Image: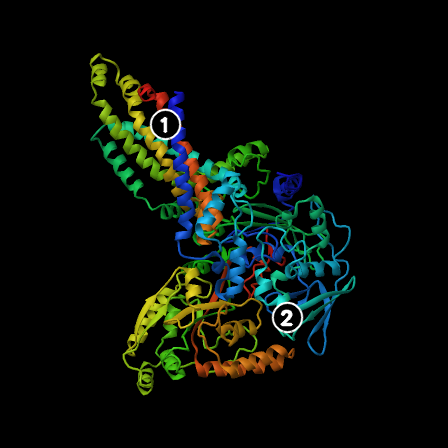
């Protein structure tokens, strides 16, 4: 135990109620898993971001609470050049870095921090690129930052220019993501001098609403209100994460008053939670989609009419009722209804087994047998893939199509389902990273994603569709982009590379005493606006 | 005694080597690739996959990876987690005291309850006490731990509100971890009510973890006692007119304890298995939960070194049990 932790502990022990119980407001969140670390850049899980990026750090631009809209963060304002290649950010002045026993900042946040935050991820020669052996920046890489960012230039202490290699409309949404959190260069320098670089991942220093206090592995994370926070000050004094992996136990803790709010209740418990007088439940459509992807390169699934016929044979409402237990809605488009550019004018294929059977006959498809892949794990967009596959099996049997259900270990499933010439249709889904339609459509359905290493599991390559996406990506006019994406969804529906299954609903149960919690469409859990009634 | 100990210790060397092979192969035999699991639904290009695999050393032939592992092990390097990037040994040492504390209290409960129940059942063979306790032991032995834990939480924490739901201590208490044992640290902290809170948090998980060992110990004690009670020296003692209490306590129990101690020693393995479920359900930050998380993420270094450390621990405990035997029964020592 080092001096830092000791004194912080002592300080918090006082704050946490040993001496002044009535003074401090402590909010306890029963989180579902342990963070992998506290530096947001090397990790990809939402759990880690909830513990690091959201309470402790800020980005240049932020998602406005409860939306996927962009608002100023550490950058007060910005300009985008006419060719869409240069982003000039005017940084907020007077933003204080947090301090701890090992580090007291001598200066405010400035352009050097911004440059450091990007350079350490993209530049292999930066001494902080590999500050822990084996560290990688997977989000930075997978959001294509290495090929997109040409350079980050300091104009003056409070102005930074990011130069891109190509126009990229979702860029602002990309850098509002957790991996682009701004870290302190001065703190990094201090640790380098002290020879304890790994503490960058253990004792985070940020500009966010809460200061990190201590982490007891797999048990408890403690934060304190940041008194110098540049934004609106949090209403609670202490924030505690009580790590509780089992959903049933989380609920018991919530009921017993051991925590104020919990994520991810078991779907079967939601009705009982709603009936409990001491609890309330917030709900919101998740930014996700579950789908069945045909292999559009293999006969007879290369024929759009066959795919459409199969889609018509599928009773999707029954899947929502039985598998999602009502906690979801039937999907007709590849993007969720809460996302801008969602084309609500599109009509879903009707559930009509008779017509489906006839269509199959017309296309000369007889005695078809196929495989349906059911993934072995529960995901936020799909509570039970096996059960879904069984329902599809029954539906398809009614139109004379025999289904064999197959499954593999999760890693294998992800790999094999992307192998060219794959046999069968695959159940899978997607949760959005940044609320941009491109983050669904390009990632899952573009020609570029149909090859090795992509995620287009229908192997569907439609030039018109991909051209629309490319065009939309180069425009920074949201109205124009909306039109292009709406058009793209029409092509998607017509060509039916997937059966769009559903969008799941997300529930957040909490104590009646809690106010001010705002659900994030991105699935983030943030607490700077919460308050608790005494 | 020295030769006895040396013999035992020499025996550990090949066992330990065997364990390194099993621990190393176990997680690699499972299908699944940590790099793919990290990429998730997004997918990963073959070039990036190769790059990451190389960085983690997975591009080398398996035998080379094994000798790497063994070589570093000889230098006391247990490797780094590929998820948290932290040294496996440091993580193990952080979490280990929680598991030991839980395990010790569980085995204490199992022994303190199991042995007297077994003795009493043997003495009153065929009585209602015998019938009920042995049926109870059978039920306990076949108890699905996860379900049992949740049931106790709902009943004692939910309905009766006697015990806290999960965790190691109330979140109101916050003090440095000196030993990692919450019962001791709470006393050292000097904070009022901390020890009581720690004890309250420990009760349910310890009872759940003790369930199976308790059943086994009670049954083993009963059958060992029954066997010993039929021996000539016990009959002689009884015939001398010695009070039953002395016959049971001095002559029978001491001899019956030898197989019981073996059983208790063997329960360490059972405890480790039980700890995985118990720790998960009670959000207990120990090595059982750590192993499960690491297996599902295919965190090779953590799984192989973690298994090795746990196995080494079981070996040491079994060695200690063998030595205890020697103390209790001189015949074994001199054989």
Quarter of the image containing the N terminus of chain B?
top left
Residue under the image location 48 percent in, 56 percent down:
B34
The foreground one among A192 and A524 is: A192
Q: Residue at x 72, y 48 (%)?
A: A190
Q: Which residue bears the numbered disc 1?
A: B322
Residue appearing at x 48%, y 79% in the figure: A461
Q: CA distance from mark 1 to mark 2?
A: 66 Å
Q: Count residues near mark 2 (Cα–Cα under 10 Å), then give few for <14, some for 14-19, many for 20+.
A: some
Is residue B109 something that shows in the picture?
Answer: yes
Q: In the picture shown, does residue A140 fall above or below A30?
A: below
For label 1, the crowd category at 10 Å Cα-Cα, with few meaning under 14, some 14 to 19 and many 20 or more, is some
Quarter of the image for residue B231 reads top left
Reading the image, the residue beneath label 2 is: A171
Q: Does residue B330 appear left or right of residue A48 in this picture?
A: left
Quadrant in the picture for the C terminus of chain B:
top left
Q: Chain of mark 1?
A: B
Nearer mark to the viewer, of 1 and 2: 1
Task: Say left or right for A1 vs A351.
Answer: right
* Up/down of A453 relative to B202, above or below: below
Residue found at x 64% / y 79% = A475
Tell which of B175 and A480 is nearer to you.
Answer: A480
Q: How is the image coloured?
A: rainbow
- B166 left or right of A484? left
Compared with residue B320, is residue A59 higher up or lower down, i.e. above or below? below
Give the vertical position of A287 relative to B252 (above or below): below
Find residue A173 and report its image quarter. Answer: bottom right
Residue B311's spot in the image, x, y percent?
A: 41, 39
């Amino acid at each position: 135990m080092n001096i830092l932790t000791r004194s912080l502990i002592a300080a918090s022990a006082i704050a946490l109620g040993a001496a002044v119980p009535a003074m401090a407001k402590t909010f306890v969140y029963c989180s579902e898993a342990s963070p992998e670390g506290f530096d947001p850049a090397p990790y990809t899980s939402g759990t880690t971001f909830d513990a690091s990026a959201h309470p402790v750090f800020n980005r240049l631009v932020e998602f406005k609470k409860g939306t996927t809209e962009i608002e100023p963060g550490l950058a007060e304002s910005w300009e985008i050049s006419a060719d869409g290649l240069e982003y000039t950010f005017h940084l907020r002045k007077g933003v204080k870095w947090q301090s701890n026993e090992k580090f007291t900042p001598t200066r405010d946040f400035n352009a050097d921090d911004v440059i450091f935050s990007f350079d350490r991820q993209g530049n292999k020669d930066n001494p902080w690129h590999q500050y822990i052996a084996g560290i990688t920046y997977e989000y930075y890489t997978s959001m294509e930052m290495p090929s997109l960012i040409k350079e980050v230039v300091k104009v003056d202490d409070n102005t930074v220019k990011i130069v891109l290699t190509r126009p990229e409309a979702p860029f602002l949404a990309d850098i509002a993501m957790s991996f682009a959190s701004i870290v302190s260069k001065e703190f990094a320098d201090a640790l380098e001098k002290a020879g304890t670089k790994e503490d960058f991942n253990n004792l985070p220093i940020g500009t966010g609403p809460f200061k990190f206090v201590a982490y007891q592995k797999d048990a408890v994370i403690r934060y304190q209100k940041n008194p110098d926070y540049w934004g609106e000050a949090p209403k609670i004094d202490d924030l505690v994460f009580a790590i509780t992996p089992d959903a049933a136990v989380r609920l018991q803790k919530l009921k017993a008053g051991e925590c104020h709010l919990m994520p991810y209740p078991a779907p079967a418990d939601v009705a009982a939670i709603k009936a409990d007088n001491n609890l309330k439940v917030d709900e919101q459509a998740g930014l996700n989609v579950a789908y069945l992807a045909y292999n559009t390169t293999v006969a007879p699934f290369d024929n759009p009419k066959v795919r459409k016929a199969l889609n018509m044979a599928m009773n999707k409402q029954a899947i929502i009722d039985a598998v999602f237990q009502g906690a979801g809605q039937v999907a007709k488009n590849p993007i969720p209804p809460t996302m801008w550019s969602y084309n609500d004018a599109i009509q879903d294929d009707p559930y009509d087994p008779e017509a489906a059977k006839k269509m199959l006959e017309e296309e000369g498809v007889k005695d078809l047998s196929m495989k349906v892949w059911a993934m072995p794990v529960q995901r936020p967009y799909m509570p039970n893939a096996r059960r879904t596959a069984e329902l599809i099996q029954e539906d398809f049997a009614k139109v004379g199509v025999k289904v064999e259900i197959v499954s593999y270990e999760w890693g294998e499933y992800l790999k094999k389902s992307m192998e060219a010439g794959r046999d069968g249709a695959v159940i899978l889904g997607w949760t959005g990273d940044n609320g941009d339609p491109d983050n669904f459509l390009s990632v899952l359905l573009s020609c570029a994603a149909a090859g090795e290493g992509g995620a287009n599991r229908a192997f569907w390559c439609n030039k018109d569709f991909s051209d629309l996406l490319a065009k939309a990506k180069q425009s920074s006019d949201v109205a124009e982009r909306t039109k292009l994406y709406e058009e793209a969804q029409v092509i998607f529906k017509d060509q039916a590379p997937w059966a769009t299954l559903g969008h799941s609903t997300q529930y957040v149960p909490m104590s009646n005493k809690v106010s001010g919690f705002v659900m994030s469409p991105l699935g983030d859990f943030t607490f700077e606006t919460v308050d608790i009634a005494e | 005694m020295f030769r006895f100990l040396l013999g035992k210790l020499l025996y550990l060397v090949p066992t330990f080597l065997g364990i390194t092979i099993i621990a190393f192969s176990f997680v690699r035999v499972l299908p699944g690739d940590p790099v793919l699991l990290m990429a998730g639904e997004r997918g990963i290009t073959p070039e990036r996959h190769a790059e990451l695999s190389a960085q983690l050393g997975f591009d080398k032939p398996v035998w080379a990876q094994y000798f790497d592992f063994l070589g570093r092990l000889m230098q006391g390097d247990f490797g780094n987690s590929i998820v948290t990037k932290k040294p496996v040994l440091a993580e193990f040492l952080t979490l280990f005291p929680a598991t030991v504390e839980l395990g010790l209290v569980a085995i204490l409960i199992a022994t303190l309850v199991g042995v007297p129940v077994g003795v009493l059942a043997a003495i009153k063979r065929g009585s209602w006490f015998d019938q009920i306790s042995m049926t109870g032991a059978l039920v306990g032995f076949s108890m699905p731990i996860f379900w049992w834990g949740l049931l106790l939480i709902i009943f004692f924490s939910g309905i009766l509100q006697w015990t806290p739901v999960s965790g190691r201590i109330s979140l109101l208490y916050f003090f440095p971890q000196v030993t990692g044992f919450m019962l001791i640290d709470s006393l050292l902290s000097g904070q009022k009510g901390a020890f009581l809170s720690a004890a309250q948090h420990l009760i349910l998980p310890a009872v759940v973890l003790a369930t199976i060992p308790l059943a086994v110990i009670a049954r083993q004690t009963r059958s060992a006692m029954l066997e010993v009670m039929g021996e000539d020296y016990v009959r002689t003692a009884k015939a001398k007119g010695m009070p039953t209490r002395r016959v049971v306590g001095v002559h029978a129990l001491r001899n019956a304890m030898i197989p019981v101690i073996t059983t208790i020693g063997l329960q360490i393995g059972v405890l480790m298995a039980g700890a995985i479920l118990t720790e998960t359900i009670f959000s207990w930050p120990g090595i059982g939960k750590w192993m499960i998380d690491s297996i599902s993420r295919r965190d090779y270094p953590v799984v192989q070194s973690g298994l090795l450390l746990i196995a080494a621990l079981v070996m040491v405990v079994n060695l200690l049990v063998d030595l205890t035997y020697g103390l209790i029964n001189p015949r074994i020592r001199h054989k």
